[in-house]
Amino acid sequence: MTNKQKEKLVKSQQGELNAVLIYQRLAKLTKDEKDKEIFLEIASDEGKHAAILKSYTNTVLKPKETKAKLVGFLYKLLGHNFVIGLLEKGELASIDNYNPLKNDFPKIQQIIDDELRHAKMAKSLLK
Ligand SMILES: [Fe+2]
Ligand SMILES: [Fe+2]
């Protein structure tokens, strides 16, 4: 593994951990039971992604709450559809981030498949 790859994997691992908190926070904020279920399912997947990346990085990281707080704030201020749009974009952007890594780190293909599913799940939540 090159230094650049390690750096990218660690950054992605941090992003996945932060995403767990983002989706958990949204699950708390929504009043819709179906939305809540989906947010919690995605949160659980993001946790699995962090674990996959940790298997490559051997680095222990802590989730950071900053982004979850920001997204929660935007959810209250700008509403459900606005945040869902952001999440869908974020999920798709993460696929672009992972694509160059999948040949050297084959378990990343599973993450890519999940992120595509998450983007579709997010889109299905638009009201
Ligand atoms: Fe993820
Ligand atoms: Fe995701």
Image (cartoon, helix red, strand yellow):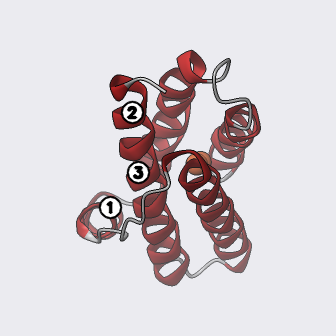
Give residue 5's position: percent from left, percent from top.
42, 27
Q: Is mark 3 within 8 Å of ligand 1?
A: yes
Q: Residues within 10 Å of mark 3 (few under 14, many from 20)?
A: some
Dividing the picture into quadrants, the one containing residue 119 is top right
Q: Which residue in the structure is indicated by mark 1? A: 71
**Residue 27 versus residue 15: which sits nearer the camera?**
15
**Residue 19 versus residue 110: which sits nearer the camera?**
110
Q: Is mark 2 within 8 Å of ligand 1?
A: no
Residue 115 appears left or right of 34? left
Q: Amino acid at mark 1?
A: Val
Give residue 92's position: percent from left, percent from top.
55, 30
Q: Residues within 10 Å of mark 2 (few under 14, many from 20)?
A: some
Q: Secondary structure at mark 2?
A: helix
**Residue 72 versus residue 114: which sits nearer the camera?**
114
| Residue 2, placed above or below residue 94 | above
Q: Which mark is residue 8?
A: 2
**Residue 112 versus residue 86: which sits nearer the camera?**
112
Q: Residues within 10 Å of mark 1 (few under 14, many from 20)?
A: some
Q: Which residue in the structure is indicated by mark 3? A: 15
